[in-house]
Image (cartoon, rainbow, N blue to C red):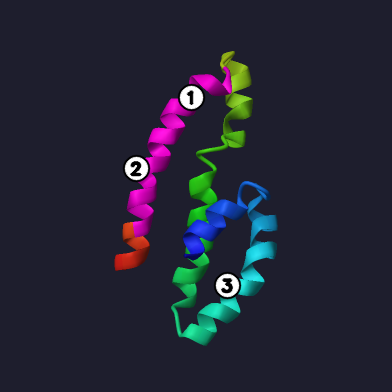
Amino acid sequence: MTFFSSALINFAVPSGGGHWVIQGPFVIPAAQALGADLGKSVMAIAYGEQWMNMAQPFWALPALAIAGLGVRDIMGYCITALLFSGVIFVIGLTLF
């Protein structure tokens, strides 16, 4: 659940540090109360935030400007990577 809530929050707060400030104070006490692994809970926040960065590729804007490309030129690749990596992240967080 933390993974998906982190991905959702990333639309409003695309900064990793700001994202942690918003979600961290809620996830850590909840994980402690539930007896969940803190490391896994923290990584679920980070994975969700990074996963959704593929849907809003602000990270690629400088390279696209240098290459003379637009966001539209890479969005198909980004969404494909988003779907495949989402499955990998969820399986990894669930099994390990």
In the rendered image, residue 82, in percent from the top left (x then y), is placed at: 42, 41
Q: Secondary structure at mark 3?
A: helix
> Could you tell me the amino acid type at mark 1?
Ile
In this rendering, is residue 51 above or below 56? below
Res 60 label: none
Q: CA distance from mark 1 to mark 3?
A: 33 Å
Give the magenta-colored segment's residue range: 70-90
> Which residue is under mark 1?
74
Residues at discs 3 and 2 in contact (Cβ within 8 Å):
no
In the rendered image, residue 32, in percent from the top left (x then y), is placed at: 53, 84
Residue 21's quadrant in the figure?
bottom right
**Residue at the top extreme, as displayed:** 68
Residue 30's quadrant in the figure?
bottom right
Q: Is residue 7 magenta?
A: no
Residue at the spot 50% in from the left edge and 39% down from the top edge: 54
Residue at the spot 50% in from the left edge and 55% down from the top edge: 48
> Could you tell me the amino acid type at mark 2?
Phe
> Which residue is under mark 3?
27
In this rendering, is residue 85 above or below 61? below
In the rendered image, residue 72, in percent from the top left (x then y), is placed at: 53, 21
- Of labels 1 and 2, earlier in sequence is 1
Res 84 label: 2
For the C terminus, the image quarter is: bottom left
Mark 2 Cα shell of 10 Å, populated few (<14), some (14-19), many (≥20):
few
